[in-house]
Amino acid sequence: MKKFFINTYGCQMNVHESEKLAGILHQRGYVAALSNEDADVILLNTCCIRETAETRVLGNLGIIKKIKEKRPNVIVGICGCMPQKKGTAEMLKKRCPFIDIIFGTHNMYKLGEYLDEVENRGKKVLEIWDSEGEIQSAPVLRDGKVNAWVNIMYGCDNFCSYCIVPYVRGRERSRDFDEIVSEVRSLIEGGYKEVTLLGQNVNSYGGGSPQFSKLLRALSKFDGEYRIKFMTSHPKDLTLDVVEAMASSDKIANYIHLPVQAGSDRILKLMNRKYTSGEYLEKIKMIRSIIPDVGISSDLMVGFPTENEEDYLCSENLIKEVKYNNLYTFIYSRRSGTVADKMDGQIDIKTKTDRIERLIKLQFDIGNELAKSYVGKTFRVLCDTVKDGIGYGKSSCDKSISFVASQDRVGQFFDVKITQAKNNKLIGEIV
C-alpha cells in the first residue's frame, strides 16, 4: 500500500485541515507513514502568520529535496497559507522545482484531482485561487479517539493591521448550522469526549453572536459526558449571551481563549483591534462574574511598530490584573501585504527580545502563583494520554494536570485532587 506523510505547521485550523488532507488520501487507498523518508506522498501544510513558520518550511523543503533525489517517484506537495500569500507560489516553483503540487487554502479539497494529474499524466500542478468560493466538504481522518476538531467557519473580516490571515484565508463564511450539529452528534456517539469548534473568530458565526450562542446550546444537549470547547474569540465580539450559554451547561468547557494582543490603547488602535484595554478588562470582569472558576488564556505581542517602554508596561499591567491561566507571547513579525509592514517605527530585535523575555518571566511567576493556589482543590479531568504509568489531561477550565493512571483511563472523565504544584505544573491523584 502507498503511504503518505503530512508535515503540519501553524494553528489548530491547520491541524484539522491536515486531517482532511489525510482523509482524502486515505479514501484513495493510502495509509499514514511514520516519517517523510517512508512516504510515497509528502505534503507540507503551511502557515505564514509569522516569519519563523515560513523559515521552518523552507528548511524542511531542503531535507525533502534530498529524499526526492534518492527516490524521484516520491510526490511532493505544498499547500495552505504560505502558497496562498501573494507571490509565494511562484517563488516556491522557481526555488524548489522538485515540488510536484502547489495549492492554497481555498482549494485543498481538490488534492485528489491534483494527485491524478501527477500520477496518471506526469504533470506538475500549481493552482492558487484568488477567492474562497463555497465551503466544500471533505473526508476527515482523525488521529485518536478522544479529542476532535470541527470547523464552524472560515476566513476573517477583521483586518488587524499586523495579520496576514484575511489575505490568505479569505472573508468570513459560516458552515450550515444543522451540518455542524450532525457532525458533532456523530462524533459524540462515536466515542469522542471533547470537541473543539474552530474559527478565526467564532463569535462571528452565522453573522453574529446570537447564532453562536444558539449553536453552543444545541451542541450541549446530547446524551453522555463530553466537553465542547471553542476558539478563537475576538474581544470586540464576545457577548453576554455566549457566556450565559457556557454557564448554562456543564458540557461546555469553562474556558475562553481571548487574545488581547497589547495592553496599550495607542497600540491597540494602530493594530485595528477595535477595543480599548478598558473595554477588554470589562469583558474579563463580565465573564468572571458569571463563571467564577473560568479559565482564561490570551495572545500578547511585543515589538509592534512604534511600541515604546510605556506601551510595553501597559501590557505588563494588564497581565498582572487579569492573571491568565496561560499566555501565548509573540514577537511582532513583519508580513508583506499587511498595513503594519509599511509603518514607520519598526522595533529592533534586541528590544523585542528583551521585552518578550520579561513578559515570559512575568507570566511564569503568575502561573506559579496560581498553580500553588490550586493545591487541595479537586477538578473533573478528561484523560488524553497515559505514558509510563502517568496520565495527562485537562480540566474544564483548561488546567493541565498529571496523575498516576493505567492505560484504560484514556478517554475517561474522573475527579483528580491536586496534591502538588511544580513550576506551573499541577500534579494530582484520582479521587
Image (cartoon, rainbow, N blue to C red):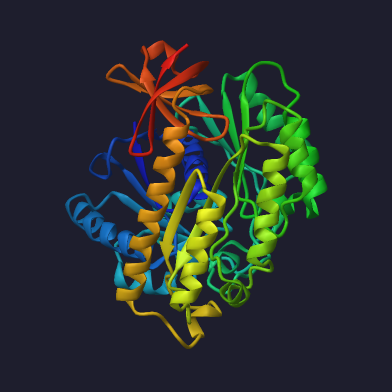
- Which quarter of the picture shows residue 369? top left
**Could you tell me which residue is drawn at 72 percent across and 21 percent down?**
222
Q: Position of residue 170 (x, y in %)?
A: 63, 64
Give the answer, above or below, for where 321 lies relative to 193. Answer: below
Residue 134 in view (yes/no): no
Q: Is residue 345 left or right of residue 66?
A: right
Q: Position of residue 387 (x, y in %)?
A: 31, 22
Q: Is residue 61 left or right of residue 151?
A: left
Give the answer, above or below, for where 60 lies relative to 84. Answer: above
Pick the front one: 344 or 6 = 344
Give the answer, above or below, for where 317 lies relative to 72. Answer: below
Residue 144 in view (yes/no): yes
Q: Position of residue 417 (x, y in %)?
A: 46, 19
Give the answer, above or below, for where 178 lies relative to 203. Answer: above
**Could you tell me which residue is drawn at 71 percent across and 60 percent down?**
236
Q: Is residue 352 left or right of residue 264?
A: left
Q: Is residue 394 left or right of residue 281?
A: left
